[in-house]
Image: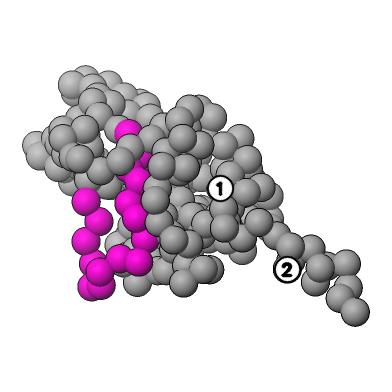
Amino acid sequence: MLSATENHIRQAPIAVLMRVLVDQDNVLADFDGRLIARWAEVYPDRPPLARNHKDFYMHKSYPAYSAEIKALAEEQGFFWSLEPLDGALEALLEMSEEHDVWICTAPLSAYRNCVREKYEWVEAHLGLDWTKRIIMTKDKTTIAGDVLIDDRPSIRGRYIPLWSYLQFDRPYNRHTNWPRMTWATWREALAAINKKPLSQA
Ligand SMILES: [Mg+2]
């Protein structure tokens, strides 16, 4: 006879359960907002950085200040101090009631502060259990999933991705044709992904 847990698993509505990979920077955590604020603190006499920058990378959008901008994101405490984006944490928790949700994030190449602080940020804002759902990789095409939610204009890597790409709407990615979403529209956007879940493959 099945235990109550086994019975529950076998009867779970698996057809709607997707493995969803969610990016951290500028999707859950306001990387740009903190960078803009820190820039204004450290360089009050220089032109301000803007949210509607053109390149995905802030430091490439301001080539004259590239080294200084990169250095600010590498400072101890930078990743720890990011604010959650509006509605992001609430949406993530709601999504995880229906789907198998993982935080899939690429660390800076200068990883020393970033890696630890990304974990600390997730623990502080979502709880320790969520740190067990962090996947850190420089190449998200190596990770299996049904959907990747990310703000990067295009995701390149070693493999043809198994996931469908759902773009998180940001000023610097509006030239692309990917299906897109915000934390106000994630339900409709996920529902529109017409993909057979990996669990059904
Ligand atoms: Mg990102």
Q: Is residue 156 left or right of residue 72?
A: left
Of residues 90 and 16, which is closer to you in this image? Answer: 16
For the residue with label 2, is its CB less than 8 Å from the closest atom of ligand 1? no
Mark yes or no: residue 85 visible: no
Q: Residue at (42%, 38%) from the top-left corner?
A: 189
Q: Position of residue 193 (x, y in %)?
A: 40, 48
Pick whichever, 40 or 11, lies toward us. 11
Q: Is residue 109 magenta?
A: no
84 sits to left or right of 139: right
- Residue type at mark 2 is Arg
Q: Name the dominant secondary structure of the magenta segment.
A: loop
Residue receiving disc 1: 121
163 falls in the magenta region: yes
Residue 27 versus residue 53 in the image, above or below: below
Q: Residue at x 61, y 60 (%)?
A: 14
Quadrant where the image shows the N terminus: bottom right
Badge 1 marks a residue whose secondary structure is helix
24 w.r.t. 15: above or below: above
User: Is 188 located above or below residue 151 in the figure?
Assistant: above
Q: Which residue is mark 2?
A: 10
Q: Which residues are magenta?
A: 154-169
Q: Earlier in the sequence, mark 1 or mark 2?
A: 2
Distance of mark 1 from mark 2, alpha carbons?
35 Å
Q: Where residue 175 sits: x, y (%)?
A: 16, 35
